Amino acid sequence: MSSPQTQRIPLQRPSLGDEELAAVKAVFDSRWLGLGPVVKEFEDRVRDLVGAKHVVAVNTGTSAIHIALEALGVGPGDEVLAPSLTFVATIQAILQAGATPVFCDVEADTLNLDVEDARKRITPRTRAIIPVHYGGLACDLDALTALCRERGLHLVEDAAHAFGSKYKGRHIGSFGSATCFSFDPIKNITCGEGGAVCTEDDDVAERLRTKIILGIEKETWRRFKEQRGWFYEVTTPGYRYHMSNISAAIGLCQLKKLDAFMDKKRRYVRMYDQALGGLPGVTLLRRNYEETAPFFYVIRTKDRDVFTDAMQAHGIDVGVHYIPNHLQPLFAKQATPLPVTDVVWKEIVTLPLYYDMTDEIFEAVVARVKAILGR
Ligand SMILES: Cc1ncc(COP(=O)(O)O)c(C=O)c1O
């Protein structure tokens, strides 16, 4: 048996350079660390990129989903449809809004929400659908938009994986009621921690802006600022969810690198598909190389747990994205059969993919996959 890697190969890792460090230092030097002009600059640049009317930067992707739901008026007594096969953040955000998650199935070849399955789960209490653009691949937004229009539902995209992705030539973030991004350490770009909500709706944007600073009405504050800087009015329940200048400074540097980042990941996704497609026991997911800004690289394989153990033992980190939420103890009462998710989640495995990966690392991963599956 060959020996493990001398240095562990990580699954995912941010790519950070001197630019980010210098930008953070500049914020330090300004002594304006919290919500301020750098956040505004970051929002403007994200807006330019995705083509959304409004972008509201927040502290995490989870907060983004939570306040998007609240700003759209989704709350107690309402049901929200979402795939079970997502990070628990999507589901916790629904709970935070006081609504009830209803778990839906996914398509076996993309692991994106199965729109027809979602349709069957709509009840008079359903208020919103949260599709997750799994791994960065856009969901069927035409079908989802049509369904939401037909049934009077809000479409809240969980685009945590899909910053930089497109659907039919248009950037994710420019489509609907609300699109929620995450900029946590391993996402397509990072702010350290961060998120954003994009919306086309002026009223929703205004509510979001108030909610992210403890319900403090910005307009009245602005009006009185000149005379009495201490005056403020609180008009709605709110949270301390705003982004900080420090995070935004990191994000601004990362935005400039997005194209180069994507080229790199796209290249490795294609190379993985070429190297692993056709291997006995491996099923590839359906990809859209041109339009996807890839977040992670997932394949399906039988005996997944044996495979992950062997990879780990050889110093290569792998992941499982995700353990379906309907199987979590918290949701035992809502357990519902989801025929595709129930089978597919036992087969999925995520292989290393990150911007600072090298061809040498890629070759080492592929060689190990082949060695394990060829046994
Ligand atoms: C699908 C999905 N939704 C939401 C989130 C939440 O984002 P954050 O970590 O910024 O709170 C994540 C983060 O991992 C995610 O993968």
Image (cartoon, rainbow, N blue to C red):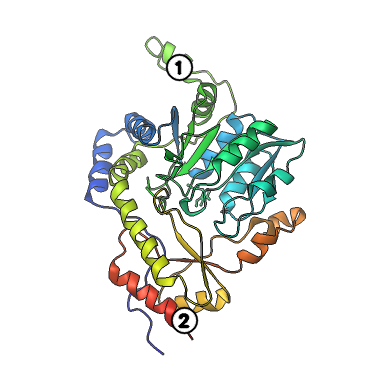
Q: Quadrant of residue 294?
A: bottom left
Question: Is residue 329 depicted above or below 233 in this figure?
Answer: below
Residue that badge 2 annotates = 372
In the picture, measured across the screen, residue 52 lies left or right of residue 257, that is right
- Residue 287 in the image: state x and y as whole percent: 47, 56
Q: Residue at x 43, y 54 (%)?
A: 295
Q: Amino acid at mark 2?
A: Ile
- Residue 94 in the image: state x and y as whole percent: 63, 42
Mark 1 or 2, which is nearer the eye?
2
Could you tell me which quadrant the N terminus lies in? bottom left
Question: Which one is nearer the viewer's eye here, 211 or 290?
Answer: 290
Q: Amino acid at mark 1?
A: Trp
Disc with the residue nearer the chain's start (1 vs 2): 1
Q: Residue at x 55, y 41 (%)?
A: 141
Q: Residues within 10 Å of mark 1 (few under 14, many from 20)?
A: some
Q: Could you tell me which secondary element the residue under label 1 belongs to?
A: helix
Residue 320 visible here: yes
Q: Could you tell me which secondary element the residue under label 2 belongs to?
A: helix
| Tally of marks | 2
Residue that badge 1 annotates = 221
- Residue 28 in the image: state x and y as whole percent: 27, 39
Question: Which one is nearer the viewer's eye here, 107 or 5?
Answer: 107
